[in-house]
Structure formats: C-alpha cells, structure tokens
Amino acid sequence: MSQNIRPSEVSDILLRQLKEIDTDLKFEEVGEVLQVSDGVVRIYGVDNAEANELLEFEKGIRAVVMNLEEDNVGAVLLGPTDQIKEGMTVRRTGHIASINVGDGMLGRVVDPLGVPLDGRGKIGGELTEMPLERKAPGVIFRQPVTEPLQTGIKAIDAMIPIGRGQRELIIGDRQTGKTAIAIDTIINQRSNYLAGNPVYCIYVAIGQKGSTVANIVNTLREKGAMDYTVVVAATAADPAALQYFAAFAGAAIGEYFRDTGRHALVVYDDLSKQAVAYREVSLILRRPSGREAYPGDIFYLHSRLLERAAKIIDQQEVAEQMNDLPESLKGKVKCGGSLTALPIIETQDGDVSAYIPTNVISITDGQIFLETDLFNQGFRPAINVGISVSRVGGSAQVKSMKKVAGTLKIDQAQYRELESFSKFSSDMDPVTAMAIDRGRKNNRLLIQPQYAPMPVGDQVAILYCGTHGLMKDIPLDKVDDFQTSFLDRMHASHEADVLTPLAAGQIDKNVESIIEKEAAATALQFRN
C-alpha cells in the first residue's frame, strides 16, 4: 500500500488544503443571561447587538432585542419563560426580527413568527424574508386612494366608503359587531378572487381566546374565504411579546403582497389588546414611556404600524426606488399595489376621548363608530351614521353608487333630527312626514345580517329604491320582503342590462327606468 503513495501527490493535497484555510477571524458574539422574568431577559456580553435583532438561546428559543443599555441588553422572549435560566449562553444571529412570507401562506393559520399553527405541515413554495419593523413608504412612492374596497355592507359602501390603501378605524364597545364588519369585508372579497383580481386578506387576532379564533377560521373556511386569507394568531394564552409582534407580522405579510404589485387588506383585531401587551413588556423592561407617559409611547407604536398601509405609485421605475426596501424584495417590486388597514379599537362605555381611541382616530383616514344602543335596538351593523366618516369619501366609490347614495348620509342624519323633534309635536306637515317615512324605510333597508355581504350592483339597485322614494306605499315591516323580491326579480330578468352595468359604475336613464318599473311591480305585492 505504502508503495502506491506518491510524495508529490501528498504535498499537492497539503498545499491545496493550506490554501483553503480561512485565515480571517470569525467573531461570534456570545453573552449570558443575567435575569429572566415575565418574558423579558436581561443579557450581559452582547454589546454590539442592534435594536430589533434576533438572539438565540441554547435550546433554540429566540428573543428580540428591545432595550440597548450601557452594560446590558433587554430582550423580549418569543417562547416560554420557564425554559430560560440565569447563566445560559445567548448568541447573536445578526438578523433583524423578520417573518418568511410567500403565497404558500394563503389558507394557513400562523403565529407572529410565521410558524404554522393549523397542523398542516410546513408552508410550501418560495418564501421571502420580510422584516417585522419597516419604515413606511415615503410621500414620493404613494398615490391618492381612488379604487374602492367593497365591504359588501350597504351602510358602509354607500355612506362611509373604504378605498384600497386607506386606513379605516372600526371603533365601539365590546359586543357591538366590530369583528363582524371585518369578517364580512373579507368574505366579500371572494368575488374578486374568483374574477382573478384578488384582494389578499390578513386577519390578525391579538389577545383573543383560542376558541374565538378557531370559530373565525371555520367561518372563513365555510364561506370559501380562506383561499385568499392568512390568519395570524397570538391568543390570550401567548406571551405578551407575541401579542405585541402579531400586528407587525400582519403588516409584513401585507407589505409582501403590496410591494409585489397586488392588493391586500389587513385587519388588526384589536389594537387595544396590542397596546396592553406592549405596555406589559415595556414596564418590565423599565422603558421610559415618553414625555406624555402612557399615550406617547402607544401613539408612536400605532403610528409606525398604520402608516405602512398605502397605495403604491403606478410608475415602475419610481416604485423600485422605494425607501427601506428589504434586500429579499429587490428585483421583485411591482408598482400599483396597495395595503388597506382595518384597525379595531375597543372603547370602554363609549368613551372615544380616552387615550388610545383619540390616538388611533388621529392617524386613520376615517372611522366607523358602532353603538351599543343601536345594536340592542336591532340595527346591525350598529353604525352611528352621523359621526362615522370616511376621509377618502366619494373618490373610493363606483360612479353609480356615488350618484345614487350621494345624499344618503345627510338624509339619514336629517331624519334622525326630524324624528327626535317630531316626538314633541302633535301634527306634522306632509313634507316632514314623508322625510321621516323615507328615513325609517332607508334605516330598515340598511340593516343587514352577518355573513351576507351584498354585491355592489345589488346594493346600488336597492338603494336607488330607497333614495328615490319607491317604497313609500310599502309598510315598514315589509321592507325586507320587498328587498328580497325586488332583487330576485332583478337577477332573474335584468342581470346583464342593469346589475352588471351598475357594478361597473354605469347608470343612465334606461337603467333607472327599469329599476323604477321593477320596483313598482314588486311594490304591488306588499301594498297596504
């Protein structure tokens, strides 16, 4: 054997191996745990750690750096506290806290780190690393909101329209139907998905019961909405850090769709619980909360989050230059995408002037106020039309809706005033009586059951009947029956010549005369 070995070969191999030796020093920063309590760890020895950097412990549990102090680093744990002990070694990863996002996430339930919770195995397909925290697109890279995001809810699409790229706050006490509006909006996007122009939805559940989240997922699955939806869940049982990061994970998933030229909708349910979770983490970290104490900090938190919703400019060469673009997205950016945000805030006893509600009101482009009294009276959705507003307004409506429902909001506000005054008067002039009657019937018309969003063509047709007084001979308790019969007739005989043009925003004399004729024919069945 030894006779077969050539010295020249050995020296060649040795030379090659010596050349391959990397003489650069590999510096891996390792620290140790000083203190651990309530999901927060103080670490000594990782002096060069950056804010929002991921750290890794011996057992594979991760933490995110939040406080950079003189002699130690404060980090929040993304896993169970009981597995971390004092003196454990901690390693810097050099990665900023991020989530791997891809089209394979659609239809899945994940935690804020992108780990599947639905027991259906790993997320497939190509994944792109998206940072949880990211600067919002600058003014140059945005454009005005002009395209409607249909919710399928008559009261909203007619009076408080939401546009793609808008931030519309849903605010109200507990049990007033806030989540119901958001879920209906997600279900309503199914028609866009089937038409090949999807709006990808992200539902972020923060601090809710696990059973509640499971019910929502089941509902979305039954209605066929999970095909284009991602659910990010950080339940009440999860650490405060995960509840805090959940909203950012939702925004990062939405940004992936937005920056690749598609439309996305993210629902934060709800930001009151995120504020509580953040405050919990913040207090344990002994973080000074800013000059205004509690609200200052939270205001900054929600501003950073909501500002990430935007309509991206339609010019490819400008969109490619977007600020703070992650490396993973370079070369994949497409212009014209949008991210719409529907944040939810829970008020205590209708107090919208408390810290968090006022903060979020000031950084959103409109508010949908829900009231307990209206809810208890059977008005669902329980929207207070007088104080709800969309700052984008008519620019986010199809032309037909704008024309038909343009005055509906003022009319309904007027009706409320008239009705409250009419209680004190014994006799009413015919004009006032007519205005009150029309208002009552329109009110009735705007009531809509849950999980039954209505296509925009149907909405415009039935609202035309309401705003043009075509229901004046119909008793109030028959308005729902009239609506059902009228829409059935329209679908049976006028799908192509009325409903389809209305959905596309077209309305003319011919369409109006057909609606009036069909409404009159339907009304004959329900007259007193």
Image (cartoon, rainbow, N blue to C red):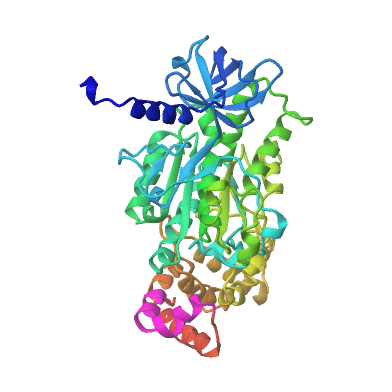
- Which quarter shows the N terminus? top left
Q: Position of residue 324 (x, y in %)?
A: 64, 47
User: Residue 414 appears at what percent x and percent y?
Assistant: 68, 65
Q: Nearer the viewer, residue 115 or 431?
A: 115
Q: Residue furthest left?
A: 1
Q: Quadrant of the C terminus?
A: bottom left
Near-viewer residue (1 or 511) = 1
Q: Is residue 473 visible?
A: no
Q: Which residues are magenta?
A: 486-505
What residue is shown at x 37% (from left), y 37% (from top)? Answer: 117
Q: Toward which corner of the image does residue 248 lie, by quadrant?
A: top right
365 vs 12, left or right, is right
x, y percent for residue 508 = 55, 87
Q: Residue furthest top?
A: 87
Foreground: 427 or 432?
432
| Magenta-drawn stretch contains 167 | no
| Quarter-of-image position of residue 188 | bottom left
- Main secondary-structure element of the magenta-colored stretch: helix
